[in-house]
Image (cartoon, rainbow, N blue to C red):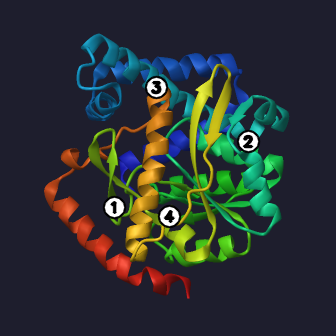
C-alpha cells in the first residue's frame, strides 16, 4: 500500500486534472505563481540545485542578485509548465498552433517523414515539451513515441500515461517494463517520430559530454537510435514566449565516420549538448533542471555504478534492435 506522502501526491495530481482545467485560467495562473514564489523563497534543496545549475549557464562571476532573479523566473516558468499540463486537455488546438513561434528547418523534418525516414527529436527540460508534441502532431507528424520517467506513486505515472495517450502519444516507461530501445527502433524504421528528453541521466546509463564548460551526464539513447536505424537526429530547444511558446529545431546531425559505434554516439551527443547550450543560454529561465546533472554534483559511488551500467549496456545495445 502506498504511504501517506504518495497518496497525497496522487491526490494532488488528480485535483490538477479534475479541477485546474475547470477554473478560470487567470485564477490558476495567480495560484501557481504564488506557490512558485513560495518555494523559491524557502530555498529548499531543489531550488538550491536549480541555482547551482544556473551558475554554470550564467557564468561563475554572476552576482547573487542576478542569480536569484533568474531562479525565481525559472520557478515561475516551471509552475507554468505544470499549469499548462493540467490545462492542455481543454486547450483549443488553434491556440496551440497559433501560439507557437517555430524556428529552424521544419520543412527538412517533414521532408524526412514524407520519405519514410524516422526522426529522433532530442530535447532538454525546457519550456513545455508536451505542448510542443501536441503542436507537431497537429502539423501533420502523426503519432509520436516518447519515453518518460516512471514517476512514483504508480497512480501518478498512470495518470501521465493516460494524459499523453489522450494527446495522441505512444508512451513507454524508462524503467519498470520491457526495454524501450527495441520498440523505439521499430517505430523509427517505420518512419515515425520519437521524442526523447536527453539532458538528464534518469536510467543510470548516461554518457559524459562537455556542457557549459563542465562534464555532464546525458542520456545517449537518441544518438544510439539514429546510429542503429538511420533515423535523423534533430536537437530541439523550447521556451515560453509571452503567452505563447517557442521551439527551435536544428538540422539533422550526421553520423560521423569514427572507428566504433560508441565513439559515433558520443560525438553526436556532444553536438546535441552544444545545441542545448545555445538555447539554454538564450532562455536560462526556462530550463527546469532542479536535479544534479553535472558530474561534480553527483554522488561518486552512484556515478561509478552508472558508468559501469553504461559500459554493459553499450555492449548489449546491438542486441536490443534485433
What is the x, y in percent for residue 88? 70, 38
| The label number, if any, that marks residue 89 in the structure image | 2
Q: Is residue 221 left or right of residue 194?
A: left
Quarter of the image that includes the C terminus = bottom right
Distance CA(mark 2)–CA(mark 1): 35 Å
Q: Which badge, 2 or 1, comes first in the chain's sequence?
A: 2
First reached walking from the N terminus: tag 4 or tag 1: 1
Relative horizontal placement of residue 103, taking residue 310 as reference (left or right): right
Q: Which residue is mark 1?
A: 207
Other-residue count near label 4 (Cα within 10 Å), few / some / many at <14 / 14–19 / ≥20: many
Q: Name the residue rendered at 73%, 74% in the picture.
A: 190
Q: Nearer the viewer, residue 113 or 163?
A: 113
Between residue 147 and residue 221, name the one nearer to us. Answer: 221
The tag earlier along the polypeptide, 3 or 2, is: 2
Where does label 3 land, which residue?
285
**Viewer-side residue, 159 vs 176:** 176
CA–CA distance between discs 3 and 1?
25 Å
* 303 is higher (above) or lower (below) than 309: above
Q: Which mark is residue 223?
A: 4
Amino acid at each position: 500500500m502506498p504511504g501517506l506522502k504518495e497518496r497525497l501526491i496522487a491526490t494532488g495530481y488528480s485535483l490538477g486534472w479534475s479541477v485546474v482545467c475547470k477554473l478560470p485560467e487567470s485564477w490558476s495562473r495567480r495560484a501557481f505563481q504564488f506557490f512558485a514564489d513560495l518555494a523559491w523563497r524557502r530555498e529548499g534543496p531543489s531550488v538550491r540545485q536549480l541555482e547551482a545549475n544556473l551558475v554554470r549557464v550564467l557564468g561563475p562571476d554572476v552576482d547573487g542578485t542576478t542569480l536569484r532573479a533568474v531562479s525565481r523566473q525559472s520557478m515561475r516558468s516551471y509552475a507554468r509548465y505544470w499549469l499548462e499540463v493540467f490545462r492542455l486537455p481543454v486547450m483549443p488546438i488553434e491556440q496551440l498552433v497559433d501560439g507557437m513561434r517555430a524556428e529552424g528547418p521544419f520543412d527538412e523534418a517533414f521532408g524526412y517523414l514524407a520519405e519514410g525516414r524516422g526522426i529522433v527529436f532530442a530535447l532538454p527540460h525546457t519550456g513545455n515539451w508536451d505542448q510542443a508534441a501536441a503542436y507537431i502532431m497537429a502539423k501533420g507528424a502523426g503519432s509520436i513515441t516518447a519515453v518518460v520517467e516512471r514517476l512514483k506513486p504508480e497512480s501518478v505515472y498512470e495518470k501521465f500515461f493516460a494524459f499523453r495517450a489522450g494527446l495522441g502519444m505512444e508512451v513507454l516507461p524508462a524503467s519498470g517494463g520491457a526495454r524501450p530501445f527495441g520498440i523505439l527502433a521499430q517505430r523509427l524504421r517505420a518512419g515515425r517520430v520519437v521524442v526523447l528528453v536527453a539532458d538528464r541521466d534518469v536510467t543510470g546509463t548516461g554518457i559524459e559530454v562537455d556542457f557549459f564548460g563542465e562534464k555532464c551526464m546525458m542520456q545517449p539513447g537518441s544518438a544510439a537510435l539514429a546510429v542503429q536505424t538511420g533515423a535523423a537526429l534533430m536537437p530541439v530547444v523550447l521556451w515560453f514566449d509571452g503567452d505563447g511558446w517557442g521551439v527551435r529545431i536544428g538540422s539533422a546531425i550526421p553520423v560521423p565516420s569514427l572507428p566504433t559505434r560508441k565513439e559515433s554516439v558520443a560525438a553526436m551527443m556532444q553536438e546535441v549538448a552544444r545545441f542545448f547550450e545555445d538555447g539554454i543560454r538564450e532562455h536560462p529561465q526556462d530550463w527546469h533542471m532542479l536535479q544534479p546533472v553535472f558530474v561534480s554534483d553527483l554522488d561518486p559511488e552512484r556515478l561509478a555504478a552508472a558508468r559501469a551500467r553504461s559500459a554493459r549496456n553499450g555492449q548489449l545495445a546491438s542486441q536490443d534492435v534485433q
